[in-house]
Amino acid sequence: MKSCLVNLASFAAMLFSPSASYADSGLAAICGECAPQRIAQCGGFLESPAIDSKGSVWVSDVVGGRVLQISPEGDCKAKFLTGGHPNAAKFRSDGKLLVADWQGLLLYDPATATSQSLPLEYNDEKITDLNDLVIDRDGGVYLTAPGKSSLTNPVGRVFYRSASGEVRLIGKGLAYPNGIALSADGEAVLVSEFASKRIISLPSVTAKSPFAMAYVFALTEGGVGVDGMATDGKGRLYGANLAAGEVLVYDRRAKRLGAIGLPTGAGALTTNVAIGGGYIYVTEAEKGQVWRMKIAE
């Protein structure tokens, strides 16, 4: 996995460069000129910005196996070594950090600086090769498990682990399920099917609509495909378009509002997005940087 990520970074850096424009006009109501500011340069293949209850930003370094905390001054401090490849991290309501790692699902407690592996089994199979996660209102977690899937080998899966530890399969036969997010009403699970350059919508385990079904939410252009994703309180979806140096934005009805580009000179490997504290945060893996832009609303 490590060598694949390094090769991908080198390949994408040669082929793509970030957008020179900051934003499309359709985004003005969200972030004005959407001018990103770099807040840290940690190095490594950065993913998954997560905001704790104090407003502190945490990120994961997939290749280095690190979970880092960024100080207000922009210093990056390793807080947790997973022993694997941490792709995503999200804080639970109790302040503990859930980490989707290629070795499985981990839980880190910042208060005690201790970690543990959480059981994740389906039909007696231990689920590994995790990529991304999102936590629902009940404390359950949706997880993408791409494994060795690709466009020509669509064997990726999406799982749901309830707060009590019960595991369900909610999606299969996918061409590298990558980023994952929840709709604002909790009815739908949005999944980036990375290798087919599309975002799909799956019914959540709590969906109440009798018409709930799986469908294509959006098709993407440019770059390799959408990596990490996040939704805001109005149901808008933000997707980091890997190797395009941009974040695609859609409204809750899947209408594309535009693309927020990192400035000229930034890396092209936009990997993930988080929203918190009045900012949109973006991780970039070519140069190992973290960017943010102020939300206008």
Image (cartoon, grey):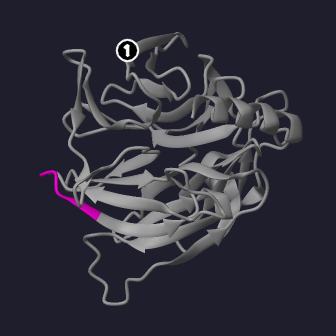
Q: Where is residue 199 in the image (x, y as percent from the top left)?
A: 58, 65
Residue placed furthest toward the left: 164
Which quarter of the image is occupied by the N terminus?
top right
Q: Is residue 166 magenta?
A: yes
Residue 260 at x, y percent in the picture: 71, 47
Can residue 39 be seen by looking at this rendering?
yes
Frontmost residue, 120 versus 91: 120
Counting from the top left corner in percent of width and height, residue 191 is at 50, 61
Q: 8 or 293: which is nearer to us?
A: 8
Query: Residue shown at 62%/58% (left/top)?
Result: 150
The boundaries of the magenta stretch are 164-168
Q: Mark 1 points at which residue?
A: 79
238 shown above or below 154? above
Mark 1, Cα crowd under 10 Å, few <14 / some 14-19 / many 20+, is some
Label 1 residue SS: strand
- Magenta residues, dominant SS class: loop
Q: What residue type is labelled 1?
A: Lys
124 left or right, relative to 80? left
Residue shown at the point (47%, 30%) measured from the top left: 85
Looking at this view, name the residue that lies furthest to the front. Answer: 124
Nearest the viewer among 264 and 172 is 172
**Residue at position x 49%, y 50% from top?**
147
Relative to 216, residue 235 above or below = above
Q: Is 204 on the left-hand or right-hand side of 180?
A: left
Residue found at x 85% / y 38%: 17
Q: Please determine whether, in this image, residue 247 is positioned above or below residue 258.
A: above
169 drawn magenta: no
Q: How far across and how far down the image is residue 184, in percent?
A: 39, 63
